[in-house]
Each structure stands twice: as C-alpha cells, then as structure tokens.
Image (cartoon, helix red, strand yellow):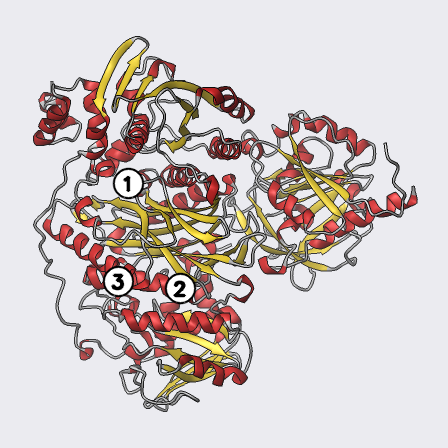
Amino acid sequence: MSATNQKPAYELLGLKEKEYQGICDAMGREPNYTELAVFSLMWSEHCGYKHSRPLLKNLPTEGERILQGPGENAGIIDIGDNLAIAMKIESHNHPSAIEPFQGAATGIGGIVRDIFAMGARPIANLDPLHFGPLEKSRQKYLLEGVVEGIAAYGNCMGIPTVAGEIHFEDAYEGNCLINVMCVGLVEQDKILRAKAEGPGNLVLLFGSTTGRDGIGGASILASAEFDETAQEKRPTVQVGDPFTEKKLLEACLEMRDKGLLVALQDLGAAGLSSSSSEMASKGGVGIDMDISKVPLREQDMEPFEIMISESQERMLAVVTPELETEALAVCEKWDLDAVIIGKITDTKRMRVFLGDELVADMPVDALVDDAPTYIVEAVRPAHEVDDPLPEDHYRHPTDLNETLTTLLRSPNICDKRWVYEQYDHMVQTNNAIWPGAESAVLRIKGRQSGVALTTDGNGRRCYLDPRRGARAVVAEAARNLSCTGAKPLAVTNCLNFGNPEKGEIYHQFREAVEGMAEACLAFETPVTGGNVSFYNESFGQAVYPNPVVGMMGLVEDVRLVQTPGFKDEGDVVLLLGNARPAADGSEYQLRIHGEVAGRIPDVDLEMEKKLQLLVREAILEGLVKSAHDVSDGGLACCLAESAIDGGHGAVIELASSQASQGAGDQRSGLQADQRPDLLLFGEAPGLIVVTVEEKNLEHFAQLAQDLPAHVIGRVEGDRLVVQAAGVEHINIPVAQAAQAWGTALETLIGDVG
Amino acid sequence: MAISSQTEVTPVRFGVVVFPGSNCDADSHDAVRSFAGADARYLWHKDTDLGGLDCVILPGGFSYGDYLRCGAIARFSPIMNAVQRFADDGGLVIGICNGFQILLEAGMLPGAMHQNEGLKFVCKLVNLRVENNGIPFTTGYERGQVIKVPIAHHEGNYFIDQAGLAEIEANGQVVVRYCDDEGETTEASNPNGSLGNIAGVCNREHNVFGLMPHPERVCEEIVGGTDGRGVFESIINAVGAKAAAR
C-alpha cells in the first residue's frame, strides 16, 4: 500500500485534523464515511467560504432596490412595475483549465440554473475571460475550447451572450480565469427561493440522471492549487447537456407559473448534499431522503457517491403533497426524469436512507453554517510600492502613430468580434446596443426602460495595488453603464485570487474586498452575491488578484442610449474629468515598456460620481451623441475606438490651458505639457470622451456647471489627428486604425479566413 | 358557427411550433404580434390540430439539442405530419434557421445542410438579395433588393446536387442569397459556404419557405433594424388576398 493510503480518511478528503474534530463535536460521535464525505465538501473552501466569510461581511449588501442579497442562488434587484432582475456571477476556472470546452460549458449551465432557480427567465450571459498570451499554443487551445463551450451551451439554451471581456497576460498562463454571469428577468410576485418549508412537504428531484461524473468536481477543484497532477483531474470535470437544461428551464418556469413550487434549488457543487442541506437550513427544517430512489446513470453507486455527485442539469424542489401529481406531469411533458426522493421534517437534521437503511444522519446547521473560518496574517508583497514610477523612468517612444497601432493591435484592446460572433448575441431580440460597446443594453419588451449590463476586471492594476485596483474596477463598471445612459444599481462579484493560506494572497484579498466595499458604497451599488475563487495558482504561481465585477443598471428610456462611436461630422468632442493619466499598470507600460510596476493612480470617487451623473443626464436629455470612457490604451485608444466604431475621423487639439466654450477655466488635470506619450496612452480612472452637437454645447455646459468638461476637438474627415500644445503627435487614417484593431485577434489566433 | 363577411378584418392566424429545444419561438411569436392584422399562438410539438391557421412557423433553436443532426429528430414529432398535410392543402409554412433544417430533413424543401465552412457558430448581420419576390413570403420586397438580416447558426452551409440546383434555379425556388452591400453574391459575403450563396429556398408550389437568416430578429428599429418585417407583411398580405379572392 502506498503511503498516502495510510493517511486518515478525513485528510484524503481535504480536511484538517481540527476540522475533523469539529465535525465529531457537531455530530456527537465519529462520522461514518458517507457523512464524512458530505461534510468534507460542505466544509470545503468552495462551499464553506472558510477564508473569505469574515471579510465579505464588509461589503454593502442592502439597498432599497435590493429584493434579495447574498445567500440565495442569485441576487434580485427591483426595476419597478413588478419586475425584477436576477443576477449572479461565478467562476469555472479550474474545470476550464483542465477541459476547456466542457469546463466552460458546464460553467454556463451552473450559472443559468442559479438564475432560473429564482424563478427568473435568463435573458443574458456575460463572460469575462482571462488567458495567458496567445503566442503560446496551449492558450489558443484554451481560448478556442472555452469560447466554443460557452457558445455550445448558451446558444442552445437560447440565452444571448451580450457582453464580457477577454484579456491575455502571462499571469494567467497556468490558470485561466473563466467567469460566467447570467442575468434573468422575473415578475416580483413569481420570485422563487430555495427555502424549504412545511414539514410533510415532498422533495422532488428532477432533470438528468445521477452518475459518477464530477464527483467532488467543483468543490475539490476549486479548493486546491494546480500541480503536475492537474491532468489526472480531467474525469472530475462534468459533461454538459444544454438540451436537457433547456427543458429543465421551461419545466421550472411552467411549474412556477402554475404555482406548484414551495422552493427550488439547483444542484451545483457538492450535488445533492449541498442543495438539500442548504434548502433545509434556509427554512430551519430537516430533510429525509431515500437515495435508492435517485435515478442513476450507472449501477452500484455508493451512497456517498450519490450524495456528492455533480452530474449536471438537476434541480431539487419542494412541493406540497396535493400538487405532487401536477408537478410530475410538467416534468413528464418536458421528458425529464422526476422522482420524489424525500420529505421535509421538523428535525433540523439531514437523514439519508438507502431504502430502509439509515446511511447518514447529520445536523443541517452544522453542515451549512459551521464550517470554520480562518483569518491569515496579511503580508504586503514587495512589488506593492507607495510611489508611482517617475515619468522619466520611461524611454520616449519615437513614433506615436506606431505606438497607437501597436496598442490597437493588443489582444486586450482590439476588436473581439472573433469571440462574440460565435455567441448567439441576438436571440430573444432585446439588444438595444449590440456587443462591442461600453456595455450591453437590453430593452424590456412592453416597457420604455432597459437594462444595461457590464463586467469589468483588471488584475494588473489590482496586482500593483489591490485596494485602488478594486475601487477602479467598480468605478469603471459604473462608468461603462453611465456612458450608455444607465444608472448603476447593483453588483455581483467574482473574486479570483491565489491561495489564501499565504499571507500575500490574503493581503491582496482583504485589500481588494475593502476597496470594492468603499466603491460600492460610494456608487450605491450593493453587492447582491457572487463567488469567491481561491487557489488560482499553478506550481505556486498565483494569478493576478482579480476581483471581477458584474454590474447592472437601469436606463429610463431605451431609445436614448448611446454608444462610443462618433456619429456626425462637425460634432464637438469634449473630455470630461480631471484625472492625470499614468503609465504605471497601463497597457502602454506592458506592451511598449515590457513591465508591470509602480503604483496606479487612485480613483476620485466623488468626482467620478458627479461626472457619471452628468453623462447620464446629458444622454437622457438627448444632448450626447457618443460617450466612451478612457480605459485600456488611454485617451489615444479611446479616441481611435470612437473613430473606428463611428467611421469618422477627428481633429483633437489638447491645449495647455484648456478653454471650454461656456465652461472655461483650468479644471482639467490633463495638461498638454505632460509628456505626450503619457498624456495619450497613460491610464487613469475618471475620464470620459463625449461628443455633442454644436448647437447643444451651451446646454451641455450649463448641465456641466463647474465640473471639468473641455472641448478638445471636432469630428471631422477620415483621419484621427491629435495635437498637444501645438505639436502633432498622431495622424493616422481611421481605416488604417480600423484594420489594425479589427484583424489583430484573428491574426494572433491564426484563424484568418 | 358565425359566418363573417369577407370585408371584416379577421387577423391572419400564425401558429408557432414549439419543439423541445426551440428557442426562437417567443421571438417569432412576438414579431408576428407586432403587426396589426396578425395573431399568433404556440403549437406544442405533440399537437396535431392546425385548425384555423393561415401560416405555420417552424422557429429557430436547437430542437432535440440538434443531436444526431439538426432537425433530424424534430421531423418525427407528431406535429410534422399535420404540418405536411397543412402544406399539401396549400397552407403557408415558413421555417427559420432550425425550422429550415427541419423542413429539409422532412423532405418538404430540397437540399441539405453541412456545417458552416469555418466550422464555427456564426452570429452576425448579413446582406441578403431577394431573388424571387413573387412568392407569398417576399412580395413586400423588390426583386434584387438587398436587406440586412442576422444569421445565427452552426449548420447553415446549404447543399444540393447539380440536378437539384438546376431545378430550383429554374423554378424560382432560390428566394434569397447572401451578398455584399452592393448586392453582389461574392465569396466574401458568403458566411457559411452555402452553394451559390443560397440563404433560403421554397418548394415548387411556393407555399413552403425555409431560410437560415432570422427575419423575426429585425422587426423593430430599437433592436437594430426592420428589414425582416417584409416577410411577415408579405404573408399577411398573401393571406388577405386569398381570403378576398374567395
């Protein structure tokens, strides 16, 4: 026998000795193997949030529009007129790194179930993805597999994938980040919850059969780092069946409409164990189940295997005995396996039977709530420094046209058409703004208003300063929504970090959570739930700390929404904001100077809020014809993207003492005597470029009052020309910029048609 | 039974078939309902009664998960016998995307589908040239008119043998082709490798029409265009004209 087999069972299941002792205490005896297996998953990092729970309490989670905060399958936000939005983001990093197609596909499957478990019809998917550099063939394989997996599942379900982001950097080479977000629409009086109630009510399991696939998949994969045994874990990745999930979705919504459900919950990580115990815990009840009734995919499955199987496309519901027949009939209509496997009790215990034999008997609260929490001594990593790099640290590039072209070709900036054209982004016919803009906007049929959605993450900035980085990520998400005209309402977050048992990682996590909390408070966008993904490390190397934000907003009149593209010749270009661009942490620093170092500028949350309000008001008054925030690649890339999108050139003159018509004094931090490369390619949160028709300029200036708003040029011709302090730095045909930006990704992938 | 006078406005009645895995059923239903003078109801794939309908829509989606082959299982759904009889009696049937694939599998339209030439799912707005505006689905367009309609499919690479091609070309059964902005049917404007840039065909009798692009997705300006409205307007007019002629 090998040495590992002599380790105690709890250790093989990933539990520490002290945790095992805690289980014995909760049980009042030693657990049998089935019980231990269930506990080990419920108390895993993935299910138990052992390293994150104490810190997550710092996040704001309440607000007048929040109908459901964290703790359910998804958050729910009131959008008026009895309607609500359900949303949630989650990671499928490890499964996708092992098996990209199925890993990503089942990620979609899981997050979509979370949404319809709330009784909502999924209306959009958003997928923020982070890979290693595309020059490496494995990264191409991962990208292609992940995108195909998302497409295969989401397209088949008929849920449009409307936004997301995609980013390539060395830090993700050993551990890609595949985050998936789903958004649903629900009438408020039809919202379902996972709260099991009513002793005597029945527990209905329906959907796919249960097999050995994915035993301990999500929970085990997500609770440890990768090493050379990663490939051996391939069988723990589940296989998705979107067709069954589509039927499951329709069956659940039909049962919802017929009022057949007391509670509904999907089976995700830790399978039946977590779904049943969490439902019982929420209702303060107990649950008895006979797992010999579970429809199995293979014979002779052990009780613990049935309890922890992560077979996909399964749901658990509580129904009253009176409505059992009707509920089963709906499942039959949709050709789904469905069986009553147990009943609700008042014991607060989860009792598992195999026929007549009792195989597990555990206190529900201990399973769900009593996983130990850990606080690690935080250590600030050496690369986090107090001061930015001095500007003369950077050598002067000789040709800024070339710099611009290089940045437009960066896979982090270029056109992502290759990705989103593989997603059905139009099904359900709600797209008021198509992919590629600041954020997606979906109209709500029969209403004037619409929902704006975005995801944002910037690991590189968070690596240099996790607190400032997280603040900036929230600000950017809000800015992206505001640039369409939508008011930000709520956040869902996916916190991707390394191994939290390490002091430096714990520091990053703590700083990022606190920074996110500050920004979410400022923007009044509570966190409605999300997911923590730790152990994103490969051979001891962690990914960049990457708190990804999914944010939704509401736009009052969907006909007025704006996009980044310049619209008409002669429109006036204005720059809003007074932040000073910096190279530290920018795409410019990475691509042109080959480093990631220094300290990123902090976001001025109060100024940012005012600017965003200005943009929203101006859009809703019909004054703004395009709006685009200065983000990756700085002001020059922002202008180029607006030019490319709109098919118009612009002539921009950044004067050293900016004078805006109707609102003129020195309020811009953008100083044309700053080094031109840093001025044009540096990044700083809090800058927005808008265009306004000449005749509306005065009206806009009145709205802007004393906020920094400066005329910097005009939409004109077919070239982008940028001068600063009288010197021309950029002069490039828009068509040439479009060519560089539009073909870069396909060229990198080598998929030029 | 009340007998309505021919001059009274009776809505044109559309039925939208729901197969397990259909996912553009609601879009088609909603698109139809955006027209004054049209009404729509859903038909479950196990229904066999198409009574009172003027037009049946087989919507897009992934019927039966597109397992085996797109449309290959759906054609055996109970409703398909009824749809066949409905078409034999002269009823109008339109298959969009997966619906087109089902009509091909059912033998109600000529030809077959390969996977897209690029072997990837493609979702984007494409140009279509209207080749035949004389059928009940296209009278709302000019012949040669270029319209913008989105596609969203993985298996839309239309194929037919040489004899079949000659026959459908001769009979005016090629209804729409992929083209560029100027209406030229170039290779670059062909998004999936379809033979002859064919995007949609009809049967010999012109009452069954299938196309890969999604006209129901471009029926409102707010979602990016209205070029698809012509298809539904044409159907409504054709049914109205037929009723008036009775």
Q: Amino acid at mark 1?
A: His
CA distance for labels 1 and 2: 29 Å
- Classed neighbour count for the residue bearing mark 3: other residues with Cα under 10 Å, few (<14), some (14–19), many (≥20): many
Marked residue nearer the N-terminal end (1 or 2) = 1
Q: Is residue B169 left or right of residue A16?
A: right
Which percent across, then down, holds residue B88?
A: 81, 31
Q: Quadrant of residue A44?
A: top left
Say what secondary structure mark 2 lies in.
Answer: helix
Q: Which mark is residue A482?
A: none
* Whether residue A297 can be seen here: no
Which percent across, then down, holds residue B119?
A: 52, 44
Marked residue nearer the N-terminal end (3 or 2) = 3
Q: Which residue is mark 2?
A: A480
Q: Which residue is mark 3?
A: A471
Which percent across, then down, holds residue A76?
A: 39, 47
Please report, as a chain letter, where disc 2 is located: A
Q: Amino acid at mark 2?
A: Asn
Please report, as a chain letter, where disc 1 is located: A
Marks 1 and 2 share the same chain: yes
Q: Nearer the viewer, residue A57 or A739?
A: A57
CA distance for labels 1 and 3: 26 Å
Q: Which residue is mark 1?
A: A94
Question: Which residue corresponds to the image point at 43% horizontal and 89% vertical from the top-left?
Answer: A662
